[in-house]
Amino acid sequence: MASILVVGGSLGGLFAANMLARAGHQVTVLEKARESLDGRGAGIVTHAPLLAGLRQAGATVDERLGVPVRERVALDQDGEVMASLAMPQVLTSWSCLYHLLHEVFPRDSYLTGVTVRRIEQDGDGVTVLAEDGKIFRGDMVVASDGLRSVVRAQLAPAIQPEYAGYVAWRGVCDEALLSRRTLERAFASFAFGLPPGEQFLGYPVAGAGNATEAGRRRFNFVWYRPAPPGGALESLLTDEDGQYYPLGIPPHKVSWRHIAAMRTDARRLLAPQFAEILEKCALPFLQPIFDVQSERLAFGRVALMGDAACVARPHVGMGVTKAAQDASALTACISEHGAGEQAAAAYEALRLAAGSAVVQRGRDLGAYMQAQSRGDAERQAATRSAETVLRQTAIELTIPA
């Protein structure tokens, strides 16, 4: 049995922690946030490898996982169907997955309020030094601390998030607030809107308390909009008090002026069903779109996984699935090689190419949106069709596990 420290207690960290604990290791999760992470995030598209990862982590997978849909539809500006595609999927939420994974992990091994300051390695193990002076010791560290990874910043400072030139407005709206037309035409499907130079998508997910019964669900949306680097982006990422958040503004800090402008644009550009959803969303939030592609995943006894390793654009719909696959591969490598440098190196050999493939897939799917923040020639050359968007967005990929 090895002693393993997992930095980051979000979905990726919980996948790794549960899989490693079920493999017989002593696992401690170090999470920066002091409060529970439950209730954060928005919608997630499920895939077969994600379901397999949940089962390996010890979570119960049944009809409560999410909301099934049978088709995808694209709505024009008048709210009429311009394209459709049969594609059965189950759509879940970040909160639901967090609950499933958190409830099966030992509570006393999930430590909150731990901000990692530095990691030190020697021949016998790894030491994690926290900002409050606490010291943690283990045989290996799994870094799953996300886009802003402190561990990656220390071990690979040259790897920085690359802004893609556009942002995503995101949020959820309670089903009970929506009109009959919106419920009938948009809510029951994976729905898309394609105004020139932009892209909207949304789908039903579990509501408060992870309820999946009709009438208690929510509609999760993502609206991609161009925001060239510089003044436009900086304005969106600056709150009413003048504080600038370069890697992402907290949801409750987004300026009410930007929210009001976004809703005005929705009435002008989107199908009425989508405009209604954005109008009735209680807390829309803003996400700048980044790529992160690490050239290494193994640093001695430290392994990067999930978004700490690679971040793909949300078009792929594979971020959480990739984290589950990372965790599964790392668990297998530790079982075979023991917790240490050899396991980390074997894990890198298995997962580095897969991570790069997902990042490239995101770039391909986001090429149209990225072109909108570039020169006129590139913007005019960018094309798409409703049929292609429906067929290619957030589908299951044949990338090796």
Image (cartoon, rainbow, N blue to C red):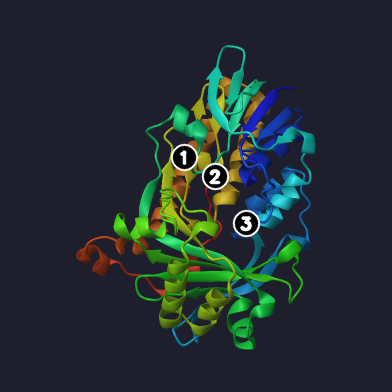
- The circle drawn on residue 400 is 2
Is label 3 in a helix, a strand or a loop?
A: loop
Residue to which mark 3 is pinned: 47
Q: In terms of secondary structure, where does tag 1 sit? A: helix
Do the residues under discs 1 and 3 have CB atoms within 8 angstroms?
no
Under tag 2, what secondary structure?
loop
Vertically, is 39 above or below 144? Answer: below
Q: Quadrant of residue 40?
A: bottom right
Residues at circles 2 and 3 in contact by the CB criterion of under 8 Å: no
- Between 336 and 327, the residue placed more toward the observer is 327
- Give the Cα distance between marks 1 and 2: 9 Å
Q: Is residue 204 above or below residue 6?
A: below
The residue indicated by pointer 1 is 353
From the viewer's perspective, tell me whether residue 363 is left or right of residue 72. left
The first of marks 1 and 2 along the sequence is 1
Compute the Cα span from label 1 to label 3.
20 Å
* Residue that extends furthest to the top in the rendered view of this protein: 123
